[in-house]
Amino acid sequence: MTALRPAIGVVTGLGFEASCLRRNVPSPEHFPVALSGGDPLQALAESRRLIAEGAVGLLSFGTAGALSPALAAGDVIVATSVVGDSGGAIAAEQAWCDMLAAAASAHRLAPHLGSIRAVERPVTSPEEKSALYRATKALGVDLESGAVARAARNAGLPFAVVRVIIDPAMHAVPPAALAAMKPGGRIDYAGLAGALWREPGQIAGLLTLARDAAIARRGLGRAAALLGVLTG
């Protein structure tokens, strides 16, 4: 990785999240991107690699599932902390949170500030989302932010989390959507077709997810365009 300093290492889960950031972020040379493929262990390894290669801070960027029923597809979360399985929270860099929230507000993105729940596997059902929300009051849930927070804390570096809702709390994520994920965070269209052939009843849920994903992509692009505030 060759990047100009200050470099803020960015960890994403899926290929479209990384592509969206690279297309929209100002001065992409300041934001080297690592792709974890939705694997928390890989996210931790990539976070550590970015730090070893000179990153002065880390950013968890991409989509998230909503835990709060108040959030809709496309809503932006600027996380003030990351809550793990043990219930303990790691605070994000306050100055970065303030800058990101101010930039989002100035561009009419109406950011939601609060905690995000880190998990080791996808949370797909409304019932599980509701249970996590009752237990933690976290706004959303994702697979990468916990690894980013731990790596940054252990290295004594700042971190931030910017996540856009892709599936609202009341929507289930169809199993076919998970079956379609390739290692590296790209889409396995043959796997998707096979899953739908076996269970065609998932089509309605996938169409809802596709609609929400299109909204989330637009939100990601707008959010990525704000990240330049972190490097001045």
Image (tube, helix red, strand yellow):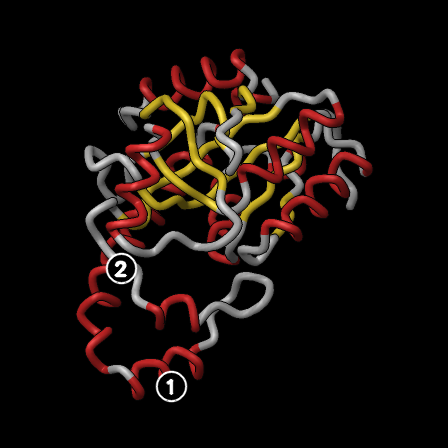
Query: Which residue is depicted at the point 51% across and 38% down?
Result: 85
In this rendering, is residue 164 above or below 181? above
Q: Which mark is residue 83?
A: none
Viewer-proximal residue among 5 and 162: 162
In this rendering, is residue 59 above or below 19? above
Q: Which mark is residue 194?
A: 1
In this rendering, does residue 47 appear at all? yes
Instruction: Give the tally of numbered discs.
Output: 2
Left or right: 211 in relation to 159: left
Viewer-proximal residue among 75 and 214: 75
In this rendering, is residue 86 above or below 99? below
What amino acid is found at the position of numbered circle 2 in the picture? Leu
Residue 38, position as x, y percentages in the image: 53, 55
What residue is shown with label 2? 209
Query: Which residue is depicted at the point 36% across and 83% down?
Result: 193
Neighbours of disc 1 within 10 Å: few (<14), some (14-19), many (20+): some
Q: Quadrant of residue 157?
A: top right
In this rendering, does residue 221 appear at all? no
Q: Which sits earlier in the primary sequence, circle 1 or circle 2?
A: 1
What amino acid is found at the position of numbered circle 1 in the picture? Gly
Q: Identify the element where label 2 is drawn.
A: helix
Q: Quadrant of residue 31?
A: top right
Residue 57, position as x, y percentages in the image: 67, 26
Query: Which residue is depicted at the point 65% across and 51% down?
Result: 41
Left or right: 223 in relation to 72: right
Viewer-proximal residue among 47 and 5: 47
